[in-house]
Image (cartoon, grey):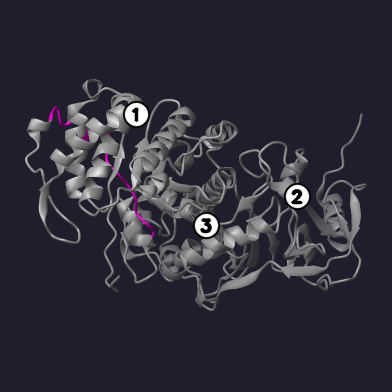
Amino acid sequence: MSDRELSCNSAGQFMDRGRMNQNGVVQPLLTDLYQITMAYAYWKSGKTDDQAVFDLFFRNNPFHGEFTIFAGLEECLKFLDSFHYSESDIEYLRQTLPEGIENEFFDYLGNLTARDVILYAIDEGTVAFPRVPIIKVEGPLIIVQLLETTLLTLVNYASLMATNAARYRMVAGKHVKLLEFGLRRAQGPDGGLSASKYSYTGGFDGTSNVLAGKLFNIPVKGTHAHAYITSFSGIGELKTRLLRHKTTGITGDLLEHAIKHRQALSHVLDVSTEESSEGELAAMVSYAIAFPDGFMALVDTYDVKRSGLLNFSAVALALYDFGFYAVGIRIDSGDLAYLSCLARETFEKIAERFKVSWFNKLTIVASNDINEDTILSLNEQGHKIDCFGIGTHLVTCQRQPALGCVYKLVEINGQPRIKLSQDVEKVTMPGHKNAYRLYSADGHALIDLLQKVTEMPPAVGQKVLCRHPFQESKRAYVIPSHVESLYKIYWQDGKIYQKLPTLEQVREKVQISLKTLRNDHKRTLNPTPYKVAVSDNLYNFIHDLWLQNAPIGELS
């Protein structure tokens, strides 16, 4: 990719910046109005020098599961790198914000950058858990407040999508290919691009989205639609029938070979050629001539058993006469378990009868509104599918459309801040904190531990008291065999502070991180909750601050 930079348009297209494909719509005005009105109120109150710490975290794992994949960090760093209000931004805000805002405030905004911000984060692609901040942002109060909405929108969907994809990967198994086919059903162009990127992060093998392939170097896959098959009504419509042999270069009539093979196959498969569609045969011959090395055909346009498999197999054998090997079939409707078994049995019968062993290895792709439960059911039925093409349920995350990340102030000018609520789940954990993952001797993650930054890190082989943040009786001693510090500084002094991994490396990180979890944490039905704890010191700190800030009721 060249180093050219494409200007952003109103549709928010990605801009080419070498490897950093910057989404042009991600800019300071991609925020909620109240962030800017708060910024003015802070400025008016003389808080320009106040220093704050915010935690970005989620309260519950999605999809009734017990893990979440953290994604979107690189996009957050690109946003910090480019954060600046343009002249047109300032002019728009002058016209949009309430009257009476002082001109000096707009001058202040025009000079704002993220240079004085420090961003800590866990590695992208790491398994994360509720209440443990996945990002911490430290810096001048006004600027870190202005970052809130944009950081949330960059992390929420990315992490949700990567988690959804990882779940599909686990239920499908490591030997089945997964392709993302969701662009047409996604929430707009940006949703489609993000879905392609983060489904690949979560473990999918490719996408049908051509632009995502270009921008993110994701393998692009696809066949053809039913429209291609139905556009032919008979063999008389074939304008081209000739194909050159792959090795000898001799030209021959592919249709003639296909018809000959179809006649022979009809006896082997006990299917009458009169029942099969000539239009389908013509379409497949046409497509095979166009893509002889990559022939994969849709076989369910009319009838898989009586037409699709017969016509495909005839064309596949005809291609073999010319030195080419067909790739496989796609089934887009019907009983996928039964039809995939029928297809595999058909291919095995042909392989044996015609001495073409490669027919045993033809790929069977299935699509048709597939979700996680569909794959689990197909597994129970003993399907013979090699690859799933998944769209709507994947990209729209229909089981849970939002992750629910939040961004909370936990410290200002060195003083801790706590948000109280009658709903204990919404009480924040105050102060600047570090997070550690403690591992057992067998290499599995045991517990995530939050501590105050002033505390010494837990040590291998040393007993650590781990407490539930809000339930006094829930506590346990842990003796870790390995301790992992979760946070790294990713942004400081106006620049990215770590070497960023490639998308492939993030994708590998997801699988490596998932392997550290016990299987009972990852199972689909009733997974075991993963424990998140606080140190004894942080526990007492939280509850002392809670008592200091909670109003005392009065009975009368």
Residue 148 picture location, percent across and down: 54, 56
Upstream in sequence: badge 1 or badge 3: 3
* Residue 474 sits inside the magenta stretch: no
Residue 303 sits in which quadrant? top left
Query: CA–CA distance between discs 1 and 3?
Result: 58 Å
* Dot 2 amino acid type: Tyr
Return the residue at label 1: 269
Q: Are marks 1 and 2 in contact (CB under 8 Å)?
A: no
Residue kind at label 3, given as amino acid type: Leu
* Predominant SS of the magenta segment: loop
Position in image of residue 238 (x %, y %): 9, 37
State how far apart marks 2 and 3 are (Cα): 26 Å
Tag 3 residue: 151
Query: Camera-side residue: 295 or 446?
Result: 295
Q: Is residue 230 magenta?
A: yes
State left or right for residue 343 relative to residue 379: left
Q: Secondary structure at mark 3?
A: helix
Residue at point 52% right, 76% down?
Answer: 499
Element carrying mark 1: helix
> Which residue lies at the image location 68% right of the left edge and 47% below the top edge?
522
- Residues rendered magenta in the picture: 218-234
Tell me which corner region of the image, top left, top right, bottom left or bottom right, holds residue 460: bottom right
Disc 2 vs disc 3: Cβ atoms closer than 8 Å?
no
Amino acid at pointer 1: Leu
- x and y, in percent, of residue 410 in the image: 70, 59
Comes first in the chain, label 2 or label 3: 3
* Disc 2: which residue: 530
